[in-house]
C-alpha cells in the first residue's frame, strides 16, 4: 500500500498571503496525484489532478506541482473561501487508492 | 449538471445490515467506474470500494472485504453498497464518487451511517 503523508497538519495563514501545502508518497507516483478541498459539512471537491492540472472551474490561484514522491499545492493569494481541509490522493496504485491525512488551512 | 445523491444511511446496531444507494444523473452512468469513500467523524477520507462500468469488476479495501458488496443497476442509474456485519468502526459518512480517469469527480453529499447499540 502506498502511504501518503501531508504536512503540516495545520497551517495558519492570513488572507491575501500564499499558502504552501506538502504531500509525500512512500513510493513514486510519477504524476498520478490529485488534490481535494473539503469545507465543513460539505463533500470534498476535486481541485487538481495529474499533479498540476486544475479541474474545471478551479481558480488560477490554485496550483499544483511535483512528481515522483514529493508534491505541493500552492494557493497564491488566500481568499476567505479557501480556508478548508485539503487532501492529496494517489491513483498510481489503482485500484487501491489512498489519501493523505489532510492539512487544515486556518485563518491566522 | 452531474449529480450524485446518496440515501439509506441511519442508525444500526453492531452486527446489523444496511444498504446505501446513490442515484446518478447528468451523465452516462454506465460509462463510468464508481466508488464509495467514507469519512469517520472528524477523520480523513478512506477509499472503500470500486465497481466497473458494467458491474463485472469489483474491489474492496481490506477493512470491509467479505462484509460489504458494491453493485450497480445501470438501468436505474443507481449505485449500491450492501453492508453486513457492521461494526462501530464502520461509523462514517459514506460518499458516492464518480471515477474520471482515476480522479474522483464529483462527490455526492454523503449519507451518515452510525453503528451503535
Image: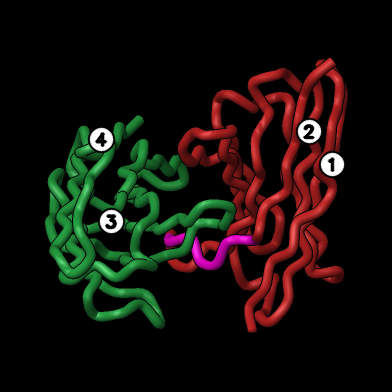
Chain colours: A green, B red
For residue A29, side relative to residue A90 (left or right): left
Task: From the viewer's side, name the closer residue of B44 and A89.
Answer: B44
Q: Give the residue pinned by disc 3.
A: A32
Circles 3 and 1 in contact, beta carbons < 8 Å = no
Residue A16 x, y percent position in the rendering: 18, 69
Q: Give the residue pinned by disc 2.
A: B83
Query: Can marks 3 and 1 be said to lie on one chain?
Result: no
Task: From the viewer's side, name the closer residue of A95 and B12.
Answer: B12
The structure residue drawn at horizontal position 45% and vertical position 40%, both measured from the top left corner, is: A96
Circles 1 and 2 in contact, beta carbons < 8 Å = yes
Circles 2 and 4 in contact, beta carbons < 8 Å = no
CA separation in Å, label 3 and label 2:
30 Å
Please report whichever mark, 4 or 3, sits nearer to the chain's N-terminal start: 4
Q: Is residue A31 above or below residue A7?
A: below
Q: Give the residue pinned by disc 1.
A: B19
| Mark 1 element type | strand
The structure residue drawn at horizontal position 65% and vertical position 55%, both measured from the top left corner, is: B96
**Magenta segment, which residues?**
B103-108
Q: Give the residue pinned by disc 4.
A: A5
Crowdedness of circle 4 by 10 Å Cα count: few (<14), some, many (20+)?
Answer: many
Amino acid at each position: 500500500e502506498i502511504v501518503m503523508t501531508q504536512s503540516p497538519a495545520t497551517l495558519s495563514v492570513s488572507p491575501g498571503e500564499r499558502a504552501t501545502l506538502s504531500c509525500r508518497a512512500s513510493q513514486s507516483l510519477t504524476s498520478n496525484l490529485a488534490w481535494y478541498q473539503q469545507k465543513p459539512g460539505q463533500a470534498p471537491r476535486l481541485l487538481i489532478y495529474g499533479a498540476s492540472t486544475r479541474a474545471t472551474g478551479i481558480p488560477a490561484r490554485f496550483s499544483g506541482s511535483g512528481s515522483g514522491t514529493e508534491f505541493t499545492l500552492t494557493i497564491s493569494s488566500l481568499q476567505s473561501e479557501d480556508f478548508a481541509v485539503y487532501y492529496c490522493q494517489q491513483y498510481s496504485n489503482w485500484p487501491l487508492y489512498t489519501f493523505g491525512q489532510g492539512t487544515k488551512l486556518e485563518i491566522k | 449538471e452531474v449529480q450524485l445523491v446518496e440515501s439509506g444511511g441511519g442508525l444500526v446496531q453492531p452486527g446489523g445490515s444496511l444498504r446505501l444507494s446513490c442515484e446518478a444523473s447528468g451523465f452516462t452512468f454506465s460509462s463510468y467506474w464508481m466508488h464509495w469513500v467514507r469519512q469517520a467523524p472528524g477523520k480523513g477520507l478512506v477509499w472503500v470500494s470500486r465497481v466497473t462500468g458494467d458491474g463485472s469488476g469489483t474491489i474492496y479495501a481490506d477493512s470491509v472485504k467479505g462484509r460489504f458488496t458494491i453493485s450497480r443497476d445501470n438501468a436505474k442509474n443507481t449505485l449500491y453498497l450492501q453492508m453486513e456485519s457492521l461494526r462501530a468502526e464502520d461509523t462514517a459518512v459514506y460518499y458516492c464518487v464518480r471515477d474520471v480517469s482515476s480522479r474522483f469527480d464529483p462527490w455526492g453529499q454523503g449519507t451518515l451511517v452510525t453503528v451503535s447499540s
